[in-house]
Image (spheres, helix red, strand yellow):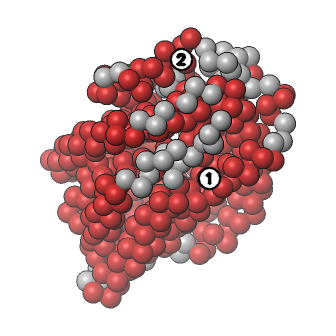
Amino acid sequence: MKGSTKVQEMREEIIGGNIEKTLLKLAWPLIVSNIIQVLYNITDTFWLGKLGREALSAPGVSWPLIGTLMSLGMGFATAGFAFVGQYIGAENYEKANRAAGALYSLMLIFASVVALVGVLITPYALKFMNVTSTVYPYALVYLRVIFIGIPFSFTFFSFSFLMRAVGDTKTPVKISLFTVALNILLDPILIFGWLGFPKLGVEGAALATITSNSLGSLIGAYLLFTGRAGIHLTRETLKPDLEFYKRIFRVGLPSSIGSSANSFGFVVLTRIIFGFGDVTYAAYTITTRLVNFLTSISRGISMAMGTMIAQNVGAEKYERAKKIAERTMMVNFTIASAAILLIGAFRVPLFKVFLNDPAVISESKIVLEYFLISVPFFNGIFMVSTNVFRSAGHTKKSMVVDMLRLWGLRIPLSYAFGYVIMKASKGVFFGMGLSNFIAAGVAFAWFMKGSWMRRIIEED
C-alpha cells in the first residue's frame, strides 16, 4: 500500500477536517453495523426464549468464557490498529502495510490455539461459573460449536480493525450486514428444524453464528489479498516477522491482559449472579441485550473516534485528538441517558416480547434501578477514555483502568453487597452500578492528565 488516493484523502479529512462532520461520516456505518448486530442478538434471544429460559440463558452464560479467550487476540488486534492508524497519520504507508500483514498472520496462528484450548476447557469452565444443572447442557453444546469457528471470527476482526485504521468503516459494515442477515435467516431454520433441516435447538443457534462468521471472514480475506480494500496483503507481508511481532506484543499484551482479565471477570460475575438463580440471570441477560441495542449509536461513535485518535496522534496533533475525545464523551453520555429512560418507560412490554415470565419481569425492575442508571457513565466517560488510551497505543493505561473497574471494584462490591450487606440480588446490581461510577471518575482523571498524548511509532 503506497497510499491510495482514497486513503490519503480520508487521512486529510481525519487530521484537518471538521470534527463533527468527520466523526459522523466514520461513525454512521459503524452505528448501522452495531444496530444490526444487536438486532441479531435480540433475534437470537427471541427464538431461544421460545425454548425456555434455560435455552435463552445459554449464549449469555457462554460469551464471558468466549470473550476471555478472544480478548487475548483482540488486544493484539488493537495494537495492530494503533500501528496502522498512526503510520497512516504519519504518511508512512509502506510500514502501515507491513504492520497489517504481521497482524493478520499473527492472528491466524493465535486463533487456532484459542479454538483448541476453548474446546478442551469448556466443561471445567462452566462448572466453575456455577452454571445450574438445567442450563449446563445447553451452554456446553453452544460453547463447543462456537469455539470451532473461532479462527474465522479472529480473522474477520483483524480485517475490520485494519479497515477502520485506514478510515474505511463502510466495507466491514457491508459484509457484517450480509453475515447478520444470514445469521437471522438461519437461526429459526436450524433451531426449530424448518425446511427439512434437523431440529438442533441451541446447537442450531451456534451453527448459524459460525456459518455466517466464516463467510464474512472469507470475503474479508478476498478483499485484502486482491488489493481491493486499501490494504493489500501478500505472501511477503504475511511471512512471520519477529520484529513486528515483538512490537505488536509489546503494545498489545497489556490490552490483551486487560481485556481477557475483564472477560474472565464476567465469568466470575456470572457465578455471582447465578447464585440467585435462573430468574435473576435471565433478567440480567435480556436487560443487557436491550441496553446494547439502544446504545449502539454511542458505541459506533466511540469506534469512529478511535480511528480519528490514532491518525491524529500519528500526525502529532494531540490537542485536536483531545478535543475529538471530549466531544465524543458529551454525545455518548447524552445518548446512553436517553436509552436508559426509554427502557425504564417501556420495560414491561419489552420484556414480554422475549419472555412472558412474571418472575423475570419483576426482577428486571431491580436490574434497572440498581445497575442501569450507571450505564451513561460507563458508555459516555469510561468507554471513551479507555478507547482513547488504546487508539493512542498506550494500552497499559487501558489495562489498569479495565482491571480496576472489574477486579478492584465490580466483583468485590457485587459480592459484598449481594451476599454480605444486602443479602439479595439487588446488592449484586448495586455493586455493579457503583463500580461504573467510580471507574468512570478514575478514567476521566487519567484522560485529563494527558499522558496518552504521545505516539508509539518510531521516528524515521
Q: In which quarter of the image is the N terminus?
A: top right
Reading the chain from its start, which is encountered first: label 2 or label 1? Answer: 2
Under mark 2, the amino acid is Gln
- For label 1, the residue is 252
Please say if 84 is above or below 406. above
Residue 396 left/right relative to 22: right
Q: Which residue lies furthest to the top in this view?
A: 5
Residue 133 is labelled as none
Residue ID at (42%, 75%): 408
Q: Can residue 33 be seen in this view?
A: yes
| Foreground pick, 94 / 286 | 94
Q: Residue furthest bottom?
A: 420
Report helix, strand or loop for mark 2: helix
Residue 235 left/right relative to 181: right
Residue 8 is labelled as 2
* Spatial CA span between label 2 and label 1: 26 Å
Q: Can residue 350 be seen in this view?
A: no
Measured as percent of width and height from the top left, residue 198 is found at 66, 38
Measured as percent of width and height from the top left, residue 300 is found at 39, 35
| Foreground pick, 91 / 154 | 91
Residue ID at (35%, 77%): 413
Q: Quadrant of the C terminus?
A: top right
Please say if 282 is above or below 235. below
Residue ID at (28%, 76%): 427
| Foreground pick, 165 / 426 | 165
Measured as percent of width and height from the top left, residue 415 is found at 38, 80
Under mark 1, the amino acid is Gly
Report helix, strand or loop for mark 1: helix
Please say if 160 is above or below 423. above
Residue 180 left/right relative to 448: right
Measured as percent of width and height from the top left, residue 419 is found at 35, 84
